[in-house]
Image (spheres, helix red, strand yellow):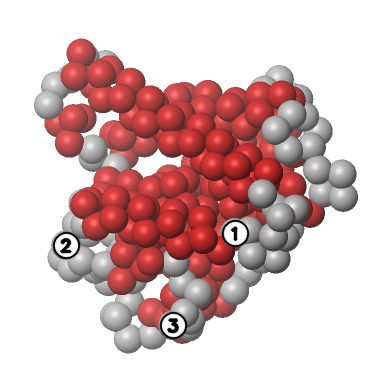
């Protein structure tokens, strides 16, 4: 881990990283890795606590690296570059949220502010990671889908091929769930042996939550997409406020 820095200058170190807007998945991997490494050098409360940005970015980096590897392997995704476009749009929302927060812009989402405001408080790694996943999936994901569909001149939204690739991401989460829970010291990993009944049940519940919330995000994106013609310039406004409020409430429960 890099030598820890004092709280003074945190924003100076993070701002240039948050300002990045990667255009491909290798660029996302680089941005997440450097954000994690820099955040790991920022002092938290007590020597053993990682900065919350480092915790979430580490988890996010693991999943993104596997998405890229599986795409290059060519066996999991079959709908062209859709999953790569979604990966980039998704990551850019995280970076924009951090950039907005660091510059105190009114556009900063409340659900992300919970993590960014308390990222150096006395919390466990799993709490920071869960709050980050909550903001990214329960808030960002539906809008990332809209970003991809809007950027496509002939949108393929709601096609079975896109949805199949979208659902395939759940396989990557399943493959990583046990390791991610162990690395983040999720409570159930301490209640029995690795691979035991409690461990297996915890991983099962984690997978159900991930797949379920991702399905909700897809459905919500479809509903918004169906309304875009009625109000193309404002059709996101009310849903943005509603989802942010919901995700903020969930984040508060964990921190």
Residue 116 vs 16, above or below: the answer is above
- Above or below — where is 238 with respect to 14? above
* Residue 99 x %, y %: 52, 74
In the image, taking residue 5 as reference, residue 101 lies left or right, namely right
The residue drawn where x is 29% and y is 80% is: 6
How far apart are labels 3 and 2 at the CA level? Answer: 23 Å
**Camera-side residue of 179 and 166:** 166
Distance, label 1 to label 2, CA atoms, is: 35 Å
In terms of sequence position, does the residue under pointer 1 or pointer 2 come before the other?
Answer: 2
Q: In the image, what residue occupies the spot 17% across and 36% down?
A: 187
CB contact under 8 Å: marks 1 and 2: no
Instruction: Quickly name the residue at label 1.
Output: 236
Figure quadrant of the C terminus: bottom left
Give coordinates of residue 223: x percent, y percent. 60, 42
Q: Which residue is mark 2?
A: 122
Q: Secondary structure at mark 1?
A: loop
At a point 75% along the width and 53% down the height, the residue shown is 229
Residue 167 in view in this figure: yes
Q: Residue furthest right?
A: 153
Residue farthest to the left, as pictured? 191
Q: So how many labels did they put on this image?
A: 3
Of all residues shown, which one is farthest toward the front?
230
Based on the displayed image, in which of its 4 quarters is residue 51 positioned? Answer: bottom left
| Residue 239 place in picture, x, y as percent | 51, 56
Q: Say what secondary structure mark 3 lies in.
A: loop
- Disc 3 target residue: 104
Q: Position of residue 1 (x, y in %)?
A: 36, 59
């Amino acid at each position: 881990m890099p030598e820890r820095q004092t709280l003074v200058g945190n924003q100076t170190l993070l701002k240039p990283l948050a300002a990045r807007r990667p255009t491909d998945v290798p660029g996302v991997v680089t941005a997440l890795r450097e954000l994690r490494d820099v955040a790991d050098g920022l002092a938290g409360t007590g020597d053993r606590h990682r900065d919350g940005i480092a915790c979430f970015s580490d988890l996010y980096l693991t999943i993104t690296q596997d998405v890229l590897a599986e795409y290059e392997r060519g066996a999991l995704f079959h709908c062209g570059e859709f999953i790569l476009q979604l990966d980039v749009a998704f990551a850019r929302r995280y970076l924009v949220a951090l950039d907005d927060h660091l510059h105190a812009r009114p556009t900063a989402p409340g659900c992300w502010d919970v993590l960014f405001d308390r990222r150096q408080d006395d919390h466990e790694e799993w709490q920071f990671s869960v709050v980050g996943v909550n903001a990214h999936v329960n808030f960002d994901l539906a809008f990332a889908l809209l970003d991809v569909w809007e950027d496509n001149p002939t949108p393929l939204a709601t096609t079975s091929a896109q949805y199949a690739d979208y659902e395939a991401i759940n396989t990557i989460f399943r493959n990583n769930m046990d390791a991610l829970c162990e690395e983040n010291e999720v409570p159930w990993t301490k209640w029995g042996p690795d691979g035991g009944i409690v461990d297996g049940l915890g991983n099962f519940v984690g997978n159900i939550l991930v797949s379920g919330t991702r399905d909700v995000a897809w459905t919500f994106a479809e509903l918004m997409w169906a309304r875009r013609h009625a109000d193309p310039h404002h059709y996101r406004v009310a849903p943005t406020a509603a989802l942010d409020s919901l995700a903020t409430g969930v984040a508060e429960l964990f921190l």
